[in-house]
Image (cartoon, grey):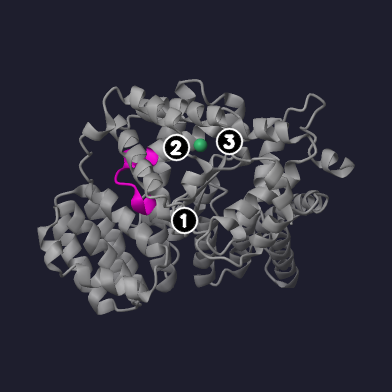
Amino acid sequence: MQQIQQVLPGLGDGGEMTASAERHLGDQIARELYRDTDYIDDPVIAAYVQDIWQRLLAAARARGELTPELDERFAWTILLGRDRNINAFALPGGYLGLNLGLVAVVGSRDELATVLGHELSHVTQRHISRIMDKQGKQMPLMIAGLILGMIAAGKSRSGDAGQAVLMGSQALFAQNQLNFSRDMEREADRIGFGVMTQAGFAPQGAATMFEKLQYASRLNDNGSYPYLRSHPLTTERISDMQGRFQFRMDTVPPLPLAMDHAMVASRARVLTRPGVDVLRLWIDSASSGEFAKSSPAQQAGSLYAAALSAKELRDYKTAHAMVERLVVRTAEDPAAAKQARWLGAEIELAAGAPPKAAALLDARSKERPEMLLSAEAATAMRQPAPMIPVLRDWVAANPRDATAWRALGNLYGAGNDTLRAVRADAEANVAILDYPAARDRFKAAQELVRQSKVVDHYEASIIDTRARAVEALVKEQAAEPPLK
Ligand SMILES: [Zn+2]
């Protein structure tokens, strides 16, 4: 226990967990999640979620819920998981887990903003650190293990490594509920609602989200809604929210389905890997009688699911046909047309036609999904030069973007610049907090410098500086007690 207190200096005698100690703990959990096979950085869904998330953070700042101290110390990072189960969870230190299953069932940005605003409020109200305090000062690492175990237990698949953690923590779990208290839930509802409406999201989104959860709750659908287990809908919560909406929930007019939202939800559905039979069903449904009767937005969603499903099945002929219909269907909606164009490029890349992909893309785009697609096309065509400065600027501004570092490394590789490729790969490992792997890559880069006849002294000195910094992080990490 002595050792734990040393590495978590924020745990003072007052029993309060400081922001930096909570962040430290969050980093340890995030490091495990980044390694999880379910973790996915899908640029299209990430960009959609980020847009909502940044608006919520700005509103929380404006309202004073998000203090400058927490703003600076916490990660404010959303980790996406391929899991089909409907779940979102706040983690220590400003990390948030979001399952694609949840993205797939929300009917609007506003519904998604309701869930994210609620989770954000658990973090800004320091609910996690308050739970930690209750559990006792020496427990945070056990709790970190417990959180990982609970995430694993909520998954659609079983037999994960996390399962073992759960077993080990079960006694602790029985005695101490990690779940937030009822009061905390109501507070997160109240503040989350204020934040999401101030950010410009429609209050009906909160109403329809609650309706959705109530419906699942009545069906007792706990299996696919782990979210309901960690956020039980008590009668107090429901009546609080109803009062907030100032109208009865069953008379709320539904928000119209936005075309681009339907497409992103379809993407989330396909990326949860539902299996070959389901993918085939989605392809067939784009030619069904039901399809003809559905709304334009629903049709765009169906065509998107069909095209992406065909791509997953490597049936590029069908994928092309579906994406052509999608382009026609979305022509009058700029946000939806852009999604269709990106999907078209993605299909061309998968089909081995990178010049066709590049022709669909704007290589100067500042939007992350388009930039990463352009980088992939440039790498595949072995014409990396124009995209290298774009990616270099991006990682300079976003050093924690592991996917962009990997894309930059691939571009360097395509240009036979092995040294810079290896360094970019090292930085990608730093970004996912895997310091030992990063150290190995930096050592490999230093070895390349030693062997080369022509040395780029500038690059060599950056590598040495970064290698030393990462070595220090490795030592710090080695001093931590393991989570599992
Ligand atoms: Zn909650």
Q: Which residues are magenta?
A: 103-113
Q: Which residue is mark 1?
A: 223
Report the Cα–Cα distance between label 3 and label 1.
Answer: 20 Å
Which one is in front, 122 or 214? 214
Callout 3, which amino acid?
Phe
* Badge 1 amino acid: Gly
Crowd band around label 3 with a 10 angstrom C-alpha radius: few (<14), some (14–19), many (20+): some
Q: Amino acid at mark 2?
A: Leu
Q: Is residue 121 left or right of residue 350?
A: right
In the rendered structure, which disc, 2 or 1, sits on the residue that comes first in sequence? 1
Q: Is residue 281 visible?
A: yes
Label 2: element kind: loop
Instruction: Give the secondary structure at mark 3.
Output: loop
Residue 242 appears left or right of 60? left
Vertical placement of 380 versus 124: above or below? below
Q: Nearer the viewer, mark 3 or mark 1?
A: 1
Determine if the magenta segment contains residue 109.
yes
Q: Marks 1 and 2: in contact by CB < 8 Å? A: no
Residue drawn where x is 30% and y is 63% of the image: 343
- Going 58% across and 32% down the picture, which residue do you hit? 181
Sooner in the amino-acid sequence: mark 3 or mark 1: 3
**Disc 3 or disc 2, which is closer to the eye?**
2
- Residue wearing tag 3: 180
Magenta stretch prevailing secondary structure: helix
Q: Look at the image and say whether residue 397 sits in the magenta stretch.
A: no
Residue 239 lies, in percent from the top left, at 38, 27
Image quarter for residue 128? top right
